[in-house]
Amino acid sequence: MKPRSDSDRLADWDRAYLWHPYTQMQEWERESPVIIARGNGPYLLDTCGRKYLDGVSSLWVNVHGHRHPTLDRAIRKQLTNIAHSTMLGLSNPPAIRLARELIRLAPPGLTRVFYSDDGSTAVEVALKMAVQYWQQRAPDAGPKRTFVHFQLAYHGDTVGTMSVGGIELFQQRFRPLLFPTIAADPPYCFRCPLGLSYPSCAMACLEPVERILKRRCREIAGLIIEPLVQAAAGMLTAPPGYLKRIRELCTRYRVLLIADEVATGFGRTGRMFACAHEGVTPDLMAISKGLTGGYLPLAATLTTEEIYQAFLGDYGEWKTFFHGHSYTGNPLGCAVALANLEVFRTERTLTRLRARIAALSRLLRPLSRLAHVGDVRQRGYMVGIELVKDRVTREPYPLTDRAGHRVAMEARRRGLLIRPLGNVVVLMPPLITTIKDLGCMVATVRDSIRIVTAS
Ligand SMILES: *Cc1c(COP(=O)(O)O)cnc(C)c1O
């Protein structure tokens, strides 16, 4: 009998001991898992030695590629000092330096950094800060404790962030746990809730948002938005100017604007933060995914001096923000995040990205002619290709057909790792991905879509 390889043994143990996120384990147990052992630049290598392009930046986190020498070195160097100490009652050099750098890069007016561990917690922190802010700053403004969010929005998987989320499939089982919020229709132009088309609509979808804010501003603490791209909804790209108008409405009706830049931050849209495209400063901003270049879990909530000041007072006034996590401000994470920002400077990542983003647009253009592609959406290095059963009526494939999943499996056989969002095929390459590799990715996606949708 052939001896079982190391890879086979690992696969057995995976199926025996693990429970994977967002995964039907009954199906998983029947398949052989791809086990990623190594990475380099935009490539991933599995335990069998097969090489793949990392088409979704290891779930939207990787920025400068895998095994980047500057990032690798930063972690090793920090290890010679200390791996972790707490931020509760103490501080540490990488956390301090990183906060200063983040404030330099953030939209002007954001002056304070509160660390946490992942995108969900960064958003939770923003929600809790908003509610406590209104209690302490303007108790007369009303019982401002609810939030406006968009349908199909995704802000994380904790109970608080699910409450401001709008993806029915993820929420349905937990509905009884969620707190009440107010949902508004997003600017999903391909399936416009008002049945209009851009630009002749003049962004009429803003009117219902304004009506909500006008009518209920005394109850609303904040409006939360994924600026420019509603990512998990299927890379829904907002029309230019939409975010700026939302900022104006929030200011007019005294509602805090919470920008969830967890997916869009760190160059993904072509600027360091999506808010920069429209000169918008939110009142609270959540960042995570790309913060450490995709190396370690770390997150932060940035806010203004106005909000920060509202939490100051004598100890016994109980204005303290009672929130914090064990690994908050982790020195290793902060050290690699600093190196991530350094690489943006030394490699002029954002400048070099411009030509590549334009090239990606050109590469994507022919895809919209495919028989079952309804819409191709792109903002920077964020791409969503929406598959439809019928191009004329825009009828979607039933979710149980798993069209996106089948395209991803086909792409995997051809050396590209991607993960779809329902019927939307997603490409979100690391920012170092060259035009040549973008070409490979798009060609593989095109072939995979053709094969899957022909059957
Ligand atoms: C991924 C994501 C989150 C959640 O981040 P986690 O690190 O997975 O908790 C929140 N908001 C947006 C926009 C995201 O894309």
Image: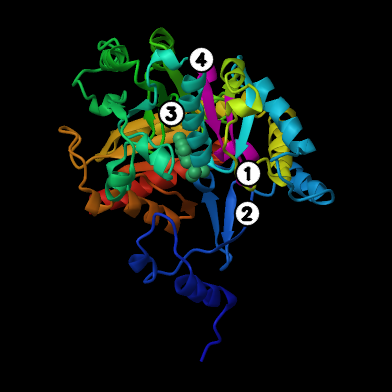
Q: Which residue is drawn at 41% across and 22% down?
A: 221
Decide which of tag 3 and tag 1 comes sooner along the chain.
Answer: 1
Please tell me which of labels 4 and 1 falls first in the chain: 1
- Distance CA(mark 3)–CA(mark 2): 30 Å
Q: Who is closer to the viewer here, 383 or 301? A: 301
Quote the CA–CA distance across marks 3 and 1. Answer: 24 Å
Q: Which of marks 4 and 3 is nearer the N terminus?
A: 3
Query: Is there CB contact under 8 Å for labels 4 and 3?
Result: no
Disc sitting over residue 65 in the figure: 1
Q: Does the magenta run of residues contain 280?
A: yes
Q: What element carries label 1?
A: loop
Does residue 97 appear in this view?
yes
Question: Upstream in the sequence, badge 3 or badge 2?
Answer: 2
**Residue placed most toward the observer, 248 or 228:** 248
First of labels 4, 2 by sequence position: 2
Q: Mark 4 points at which residue?
A: 280
Residue tagged by mark 3? 226
Is residue 379 in the magenta section?
Answer: no
Q: How many labels does the image show?
A: 4
- Beta carbon of the mark 3 residue lies under 8 A of ligand 1: yes
